[in-house]
Image (spheres, grey):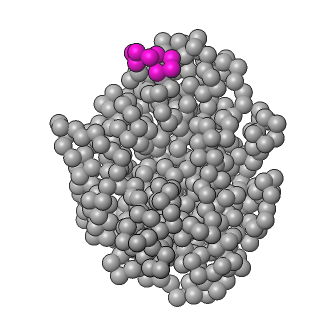
């Protein structure tokens, strides 16, 4: 069992002056600064992408272009988009159009880093796909095929950008041939099982993926480590499409996860979890009912309780975890029954601008001996075309590096828990945290002095009772 290091007491004294010490009061033009990601001996880098939400209907798609996309295979789509004439990236509040997708991938490719692998934390497809498609085909004919081709196209653009790297993708709640928070559908699973190279070349991973959208594979560089990829749509509180033939898909998936972790322990391996929707509290929904309203969950409570029990029972096998979904850079910390943190979940920002956020992706630094994330750098869109007269050519740059910005020696559950506790006890640090959230993460997240606890407590408290005790002191709770 891991315990909080005694050295964190010194860190707690130093952090209020160190974390985000250049964030407060910065202007929009000063948000991006030059940073230098340090990669040490026996460390490597990998790329994190999340919530691309590619919109093939963006920019008031010409019906003639839609007809071309509908009638031709995914391999022809890039040429169709290139000849469509659209050059500007998606506007604030919109999902990723073709220029934004390609610009982000080019920025990641030209970062100067030698990635060992790529993680994609789900939501390849745009929001409201059925409604957008219906504007062009009210009868819905060809819808499923169009969805599948869109997902294949996005996957190919990523693989084309990094042709020699293994790419590990998780399915998101928008990655479905039916509707948002629906099952992905056999047609999509079948197409991606062939399209994703890591799955197509592994019989067991292919079988698992076709059954439920999840799979496990050996880590590409770390000995005795596995990447376990989940489809967290099936455990989402918004998933209401039961399958009579496949039973309780959420329970099936969690049983599968527990089996994989047991195998890892027996073989003395470690596991890294990858998913789209994180467990715990949905801060955005919780904030709608006020600072001390009823907490909203991302997962249905039985699945959340089961997951927490599983990871606590197999703490020794777990190394790291990753998610997306909330469109902002954030984290979650899981603690054991004694309150000691043992696992962190890193949440990557989105390429989509749907949440009024600056598009971003991240470069992670990991320890090649055990796979642990030790640092990361956020790369974001430096110029904002909406504010600068519709600049057609986007410019990407480093926004911050975790270790440089925080003053911490390494990323990890103990460090992150201490960081969250400091925010709750130090007025100066709390204000800087809020400024950071607004400036670097998302202007669409209305964090303020009245609700800051909702954001901070979601990082460490996974269940409604614990979250409410942290976020809403007794004297502030609604009767």
- Quick one: 165 or 145, which is closer to the camera? 145
| 148 over 138 or under it: above or below | below
**Residue at the far front in the pictured view:** 479
| Number of numbered discs on residues | 0
The C terminus - image quarter: bottom left
Residue 28 part of the magenta-drawn span? no
Above/below status of 331 relative to 57: below
Percent position (x, y) of residue 246? 20, 40
**Residue 459 versus residue 192: which sits nearer the camera?**
459
- Residue 184 visible, this angle: yes
Start and end of the magenta stretch? 134-141
State which quadrant residue 392 falls in: top right
- Report the front residue among 288 and 52: 288
Q: Residue at x 72, y 31 (%)?
A: 88
Compared to residue 391, the image places residue 134 above or below, namely above
Name the quarter where the N terminus is drawn.
Answer: bottom left
Residue 297, quarter of the rendered image: bottom left
Q: Residue at x 48, y 23 (%)?
A: 133
Q: Residue at x 21, y 47 (%)?
A: 248
Assign the magenta stretch its main secondary structure: loop
Across and down, in percent, residue 344 comes to 46, 66
Residue located 33% across and 41% down the image: 213
Residue 198 x %, y % = 41, 40
Task: Report the side of 259 relative to 428 (left or right).
Answer: left
Relative to 80, does residue 353 appear above or below in the rendering?
below
Please provide percent x and percent y for residue 359. Answer: 64, 46
**Is residue 206 in sight in this rendering?**
no
In the rendered structure, the answer to whether residue 291 lies left or right of residue 170 reads right
């Amino acid at each position: 069992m891991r315990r909080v290091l005694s050295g964190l007491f010194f860190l707690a004294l130093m952090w209020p002056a160190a974390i985000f010490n250049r964030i407060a009061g910065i202007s929009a033009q000063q948000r991006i600064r030059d940073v230098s990601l340090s990669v040490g001996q026996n460390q490597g880098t990998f790329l994190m992408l999340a919530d691309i939400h590619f919109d093939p209907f963006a920019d008031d798609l010409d019906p003639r272009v839609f007809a071309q996309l509908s009638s031709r295979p995914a391999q022809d789509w890039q040429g169709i988009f290139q000849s469509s004439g659209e050059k500007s990236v998606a506007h604030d509040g919109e999902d990723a159009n073709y220029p934004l997708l390609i610009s982000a991938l080019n920025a990641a490719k030209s970062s100067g880093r030698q990635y060992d692998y790529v993680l994609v934390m789900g939501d390849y497809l745009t929001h409201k796909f059925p409604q957008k498609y219906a504007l062009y085909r009210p009868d819905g004919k060809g819808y499923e095929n169009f969805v599948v081709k869109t997902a294949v196209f996005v996957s190919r653009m990523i693989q084309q950008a990094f042709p020699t790297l293994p790419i590990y993708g998780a399915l998101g709640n928008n990655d479905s041939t039916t509707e948002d928070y629906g099952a992905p559908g056999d047609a999509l699973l079948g197409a991606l099982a062939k399209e994703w190279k890591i799955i197509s070349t592994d019989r067991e991973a292919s079988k698992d993926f076709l059954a439920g959208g999840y799979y496990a594979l050996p880590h590409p560089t770390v000995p005795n480590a596995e990447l376990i990829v989940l489809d967290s749509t099936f455990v989402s509180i918004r998933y209401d499409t039961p399958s009579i033939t496949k039973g309780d898909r959420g329970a099936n998936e969690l049983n599968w996860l527990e089996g994989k972790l047991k195998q890892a322990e027996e073989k003395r391996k470690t596991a890294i979890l990858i998913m789209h929707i994180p467990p715990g509290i949905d801060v955005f929904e919780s904030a709608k009912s006020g600072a001390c309203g009823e907490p909203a969950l991302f997962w249905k409570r039985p699945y959340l309780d089961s997951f927490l029990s599983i990871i606590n029972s197999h703490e020794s096998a777990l190394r790291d975890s990753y998610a997306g979904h909330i469109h902002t850079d954030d984290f979650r910390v899981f603690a054991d029954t004694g309150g000691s943190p043992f696992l962190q979940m890193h949440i990557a920002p989105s390429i989509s601008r749907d949440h009024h956020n600056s598009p971003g992706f991240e470069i992670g630094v990991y320890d090649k001996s055990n796979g642990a994330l030790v640092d990361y750098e956020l790369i974001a869109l430096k110029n904002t075309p909406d504010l600068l007269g519709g600049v057609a050519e986007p410019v990407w740059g480093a926004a911050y590096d975790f270790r440089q910005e925080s003053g911490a020696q390494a990323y990890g559950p103990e460090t992150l828990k201490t960081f969250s506790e400091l925010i709750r006890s130090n007025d100066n640090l709390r204000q800087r945290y809020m400024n950071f959230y607004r400036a670097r993460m998302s202007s669409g997240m209305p964090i303020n002095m009245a609700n800051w606890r909702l954001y901070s407590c979601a990082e460490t408290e996974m269940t409604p009772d614990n979250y409410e005790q942290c976020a809403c002191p007794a004297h502030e709770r609604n009767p």
